[in-house]
Image (tube, rainbow, N blue to C red):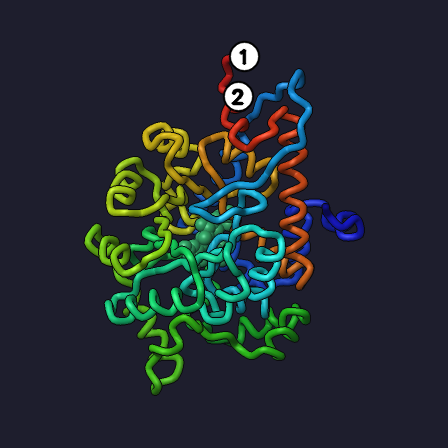
Amino acid sequence: MTDPRLDRRFPDAAAMETAALRRLPGFIRDYVEGGIGAEGAVARNIADLRAVRLLPRYLAVDAAPETRVTVAGAVWSAPFAVAPLGLGGLIWPGCEPVIARAAAAAGVGHVLSTYATSGVEKIGPIAGPGGWFQLYPPADPGMEADMIARARVAGYAGIIVTIDIPGVTRRRRDMQSGLVVPPRIGPRMLAQIAGRPAWALGMARRGIPVFENFAPYYPKQGGLDAAADFIGRMMTGHITPDGLGRIRAAWPGRLLVKGVLSVADAELALSLGADGIVVSNHGGRQLDAAPTAPDVLPGIRARLGEGALILSDGGVRSGLDVARMIALGADAVLVGRPFLHAAAALGARGPGHLIDVLRAELETTMVQLGCARLSDLRGRLWQGAE
Ligand SMILES: Cc1cc2nc3c(=O)[nH]c(=O)nc-3n(C[C@H](O)[C@H](O)[C@H](O)COP(=O)(O)O)c2cc1C
């Protein structure tokens, strides 16, 4: 059920996005919305998904739609989860615990980024059984082992290893805005912040966030420069099959591999012991020529078969988009930017409202399509034959 008062102003994710973009300083907006290169992949993620048509069956069984799904042993009330999003506390002050709490309250999944500004110790207990920790394996094996151990102690049942950041990225907008990691606020940024009082006030109250997952390992001296250098050195290059095997051996729980775009990587990940994969081009932030989920998901599903666990992401902005991804072959999806928009637009009420809206839209879509079960959606992909 959605809240009718919130619905009036924010009937969908697009309305939350519009409001959010007005409340964020320019350099933050650029960081969130931007992608790599000419941002063709960012645009295609949205366009390709919206181009997917679904064929309704109106002479159908009249049953209430069932949106529950089991993902790697955990039951989610709807087939979507919050995608891992780095730097959350800088994007909207204090948003990370708020988003995790909303996901837990609604019974959907939540993935905490390695680069979150709230650590596993804080978010793990909030996210509860739907919580996953996303690992960018750091260059130092001792630190990798320690992070994995911390995620376990924090109660995480699963980790998601992201494989699609093998090197330094050149994101034009961030280069132009001067956003570096960890953030250093320069005079141009200060001017942008001055025009965004809600963001500025939140930041003043909470202080500039730090990467809590990395905090125990930070150099104790040298200030921001040393921290920036340290983080740069922790980005490892390609995750090798051996590296993934080592993580698999160290992690006793469920493990997914995120950033898969090819059948070859999908099969290799599963053969190395992954419980499933996330088909993703990282929101168009890594390779501008990367295919989108609609490009590759049907082929990967066909090759892996119905028994394999496949999540996907990129461009999901509505419950209809969730249905489209499932029709294309996903079991469930991750939703990224919309959760940041919801928090920025509506504060603490935003993420919960977004979840309600996505669920209501998915149910409406399933009713229109004559689908009582999520698995029925696979058969509704319109391929131009009728
Ligand atoms: C601001 C931002 C930060 C992100 N940080 C991470 C991250 O730390 N780890 C990761 O695996 N993916 C990260 N991603 C990618 C998302 O997890 C997800 O794949 C992508 O956002 C999905 O596309 P969407 O934003 O169109 O829903 C980030 C994306 C954005 C927009």
In terms of secondary structure, where does tag 1 sit? loop
Describe residue 52's horizontal placement relative to residue 242 as left or right. right
Q: Which residue is mark 2?
A: 382
Q: Amino acid at mark 2?
A: Trp
Q: Residue furthest bottom?
A: 221
Tell me, yes or no, if residue 155 can be seen here: yes
Q: Is mark 1 within 8 Å of ligand 1?
A: no
Q: Identify the amino acid type marked 1.
A: Glu
Bin the neighbour count of mark 2 within 10 Å (Cα to Cα): few under 14, some 14-19, many 20 and up: some
Residues under numbered marks 2 and 1 in contact, where contact means CB atoms less than 8 Å apart: yes
Return the x and y of residue 2 as percentages of the image width and height: 73, 47
For residue 239, what is the image quadrant?
A: bottom left
Horizontal side, residue 96 vs residue 218: left or right: right
| Residue visible at 38% across and 34% down in the picture | 307
Q: Name the residue at 53% across, 45% down.
A: 80
Q: Which residue is mark 1?
A: 386
Q: Position of residue 316 (x, y in %)?
A: 54, 42
Distance from label 2 to label 1 (Cα)?
8 Å
The picture quadrant where one finds residue 360 is top right
